[in-house]
């Protein structure tokens, strides 16, 4: 693997029956990078994450993480290798407090409750949500839940963190809070891939961007390059044209 590349996706394909959700996709993530993945709904973005995190195995293609092929590993094994993720639809344990939810992440590597608690506390403090530590999962607002999700993923001590539409449903000031959290995580050395619809977030946060459309990669480059690519504009406009 080339120097500095921590994750490499090669000719990745996923078919669901007759539908090719991801079609011969190549991507790489460099160490320390914040990489953006954009594309209209149904483009195949979440399916890429599902394969990288082991929720689904690819129909064909390779995923190389830290020098190892992981495409046939189970999700818990991939998490243990060092790939953490959040979900597009947040799934907190409602009966547990925010701190306990984060501890669940920490316990993967630190089964000792006291140790897991210490790690959870450090991460909660890093993300500036200590004041919410004892609030139960079901009482959190959406933005608080999203921050908890990031904290829980971070508590698994990932080298690579996958964030799937963490800004969805948030207002601009709430987005700012999440952007700050992501910057904080990035500064700790974690490499990040973020699926995002909000263009401003892509422009301000990412180093490099891939755009997908109907399972295929249609553009890659700096955020400026990709956002001004006629193919990208067309794929978004194509969707808007039919939007109700
Ligand atoms: N588990 C699944 N079974 C069947 N089809 C799926 C499944 N997951 C995703 N798809 C289909 O694959 C395509 C890509 O979906 P997805 O990766 O969720 O897109 P995106 O995240 O870019 O909006 C869509 O057509 C979707 O309906
Ligand atoms: Mg999605």
Image (tube, rainbow, N blue to C red):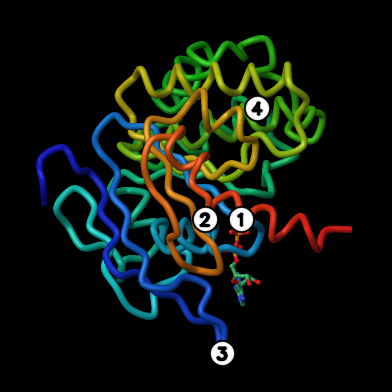
Q: Where is 103 relative to 160, above or below?
A: above
> Which residue is located at x 45 percent, y 75 percent?
14
**What secondary structure is found at the residue carrying circle 2?**
helix
Mark-to-mark CA distance, 1 and 4: 42 Å
Mark-to-mark CA distance, 1 and 2: 5 Å
Q: Which labelled disc corresponds to residue 98?
A: 4
**What secondary structure is found at the residue carrying circle 3?**
loop
Task: Classify mark 4 as within 8 Å of ligand 2 or not, answering yes or no.
Answer: no
Q: Quadrant of the C terminus?
A: bottom right
- Identify the residue position indicated by label 1 in the image: 234
Q: Residues within 10 Å of mark 4 (few under 14, many from 20)?
A: many
Outermost residue, bottom side: 18
Q: Residues within 10 Å of mark 2 (few under 14, many from 20)?
A: some
Comparing marks 1 and 4, which lies closer to the viewer? 1
> Which residue is located at x 68 percent, y 42 percent?
93
Comparing marks 4 and 3, which lies closer to the viewer? 3
Q: Which labelled disc corresponds to residue 62?
A: none
Who is closer to the viewer here, 20 or 47?
A: 20
Comparing marks 4 and 2, which lies closer to the viewer? 2
Mark-to-mark CA distance, 4 and 2: 42 Å
Displayed quadrant of residue 213: bottom right
């Amino acid at each position: 693997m080339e120097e500095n590349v921590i994750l490499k996706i090669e000719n990745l394909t996923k078919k669901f029956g007759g539908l090719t959700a991801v079609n011969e996709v190549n991507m790489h993530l460099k160490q320390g990078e914040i990489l953006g993945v954009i594309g209209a709904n149904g483009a195949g973005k979440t399916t890429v994450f599902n394969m990288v995190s082991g929720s689904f195995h690819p129909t064909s293609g390779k995923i190389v993480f830290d020098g190892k092929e992981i495409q046939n590993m189970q999700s818990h094994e991939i998490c243990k290798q060092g790939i953490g993720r959040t979900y597009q639809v947040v799934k907190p344990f409602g009966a547990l407090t925010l701190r306990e939810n984060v501890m669940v992440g920490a316990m993967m590597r630190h089964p000792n409750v006291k140790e897991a608690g210490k790690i959870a506390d450090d991460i909660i403090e890093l993300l500036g949500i200590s004041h919410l530590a004892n609030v139960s999962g079901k009482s959190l607002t959406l933005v608080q839940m999203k921050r908890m999700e990031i904290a829980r993923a971070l508590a698994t001590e990932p080298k690579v963190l996958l964030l799937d539409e963490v800004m969805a449903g948030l207002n601009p000031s709430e987005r700012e809070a999440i952007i700050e959290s992501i910057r904080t995580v990035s500064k700790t050395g974690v490499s990040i891939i973020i699926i995002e619809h909000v263009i401003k977030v892509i422009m301000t946060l990412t180093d490099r961007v891939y755009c997908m459309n109907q399972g295929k990669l249609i553009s890659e480059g700096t955020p400026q390059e990709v956002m001004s690519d006629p193919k990208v504009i067309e794929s978004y406009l194509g969707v808007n044209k039919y939007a109700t």
